Image (cartoon, grey):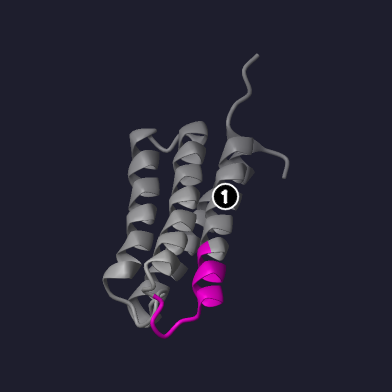
Amino acid sequence: MRTARTRYVLAATVWAGTLLVLLFGVGALGIVGDGGPPDLMYLAAALVGLVGAAAARFRPAGTARALAVAAGLTLVAGVVAVAAGWQEEGSVVDVLALSAMFAGLYAASAWLFRSAAPRPA
């Protein structure tokens, strides 16, 4: 990747893909069991990332911070779901693995956004 623009576009693509898969996963299948209120925690984490990025005017450094927070909240959502025993039909490993996957995708996008940010002189 030669330019910051290329990294920004790749970061935005990873982020959009993550949101799309998350929405379909929560809407159609559910992450915690068959879905329902526990899955709203994952959507709340995505919303925090989106609102944070919008507040930063989608500038690379601010968007990277917002997505890093979303990654952390996604991990917290998985831990809370397991600790509360909400994974009725899904196993503990499934819930934690999906949480880690989504958090990893947010983190990868955050890293790409951060690498697209201008460096101070």
Residue placed farthest to the right in the image? 2
User: Type of residue at label 1?
Assistant: Ala
Depth check, front residue: 6 or 73: 73
Please provide the residue range marked out in magenta.
87-99
Assess whether residue 47 is covered by the magenta stretch: no
Q: Which residue is mark 1?
A: 107
Q: Residue at x 49, y 72 (%)?
A: 95
Assess whether residue 95 is covered by the magenta stretch: yes
Residue 17 at x, y percent in the picture: 50, 63
Q: Residue at x 46, y 61 (%)?
A: 79
Depth check, front residue: 83 or 31: 83
Left or right side of 92 for 88: left
The relative height of residue 71 versus residue 4 in the rendered view (above or below) is: below
Residue 40 at x, y percent in the picture: 30, 64
The relative height of residue 36 versus residue 55 in the rendered view (above or below) is: below
Q: Please state, as top left, top right, bottom left or bottom right, where the N terminus lies in the image.
A: top right
Residue 81 at x, y percent in the picture: 40, 66
